[in-house]
Image (cartoon, rainbow, N blue to C red):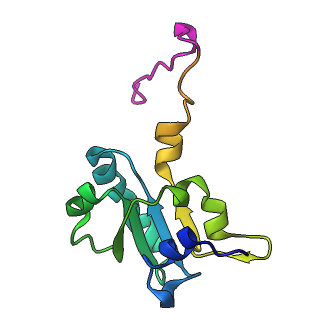
Amino acid sequence: MIINARYKEILTFFDQDDIGNLIVFSLQGSAGDVFMSTALLPSVHELFPDLHIYFNTKPEYFDILKNNPYIYKVIPYIPELEDNFIIFEGVSQINGICRVVYTPGIIAQRVPNYQHNGLKAHNLDFKDASN
């Protein structure tokens, strides 16, 4: 694998002892998105209790995440972690930086999976499940 300057820069955000064996939770989003996403962290920790969770987000949201017991380290938003998460998890003969990269913002914000050409017939109609 060719290690370019940007890749080397990205490596500096992680503790060297964690390389290859850490989790990145990546969410650019808004303050509300970042706050609400923290509800997922206990489950992530339960699945991987021995791995450190690094939260990748904008510096203006760092205070929202301060003192969260599930987050090992908050790092400034690195778009490559979302855009090329497969490479950072490792592919083929390439060892990854991360064991897992969670990218909840991709489905919620980048992929317009809720649009159906404005056709009302395709909109979901939620019913009260208690009836």
Q: Residue furthest bottom?
A: 17
Predominant SS along the magenta part: loop
Question: Residue at (79%, 76%) from the top-left corner?
Answer: 93
Please tell me which residue is depicted at 22% across the width and 68% down the height of the picture. Answer: 66
Residue 98 horizontal/vertical position (percent): 57, 73
The front one of 99 and 87 is: 87
Q: Residue at x 47, y 18 (%)?
A: 125
Count the numbered circles shown: 0
* Along the viewing direction, whichever of 84 and 116 lies nearer the viewer: 84
Q: Horizontal and vertical percent for residue 11?
A: 51, 77
Residue furthest to the right: 92
Residue toward you, 6 or 39: 6
In the rendered image, is residue 71 in sight? Answer: no
Question: Compared with residue 49, is residue 35 higher up or lower down, i.e. above or below?
Answer: above
Is 21 displayed left or right of 66 in the figure? right
Above/below status of 50 relative to 9 = below
Quarter that holds the C terminus = top left
Q: Is residue 39 left or right of residue 3?
A: left
Task: Give coordinates of residue 68: x percent, y percent.
Answer: 26, 70
Residue depicted at 52% across the width and 8% down the height: 120
Q: Quadrant of the N terminus?
A: bottom right
Q: Position of residue 19 (x, y in %)?
A: 54, 83
Residue 28 in view here: yes
Magenta part of the chain: 117-131
The verdict on residue 74 being magenta is no
Residue 84 image-quadrant placement: bottom right
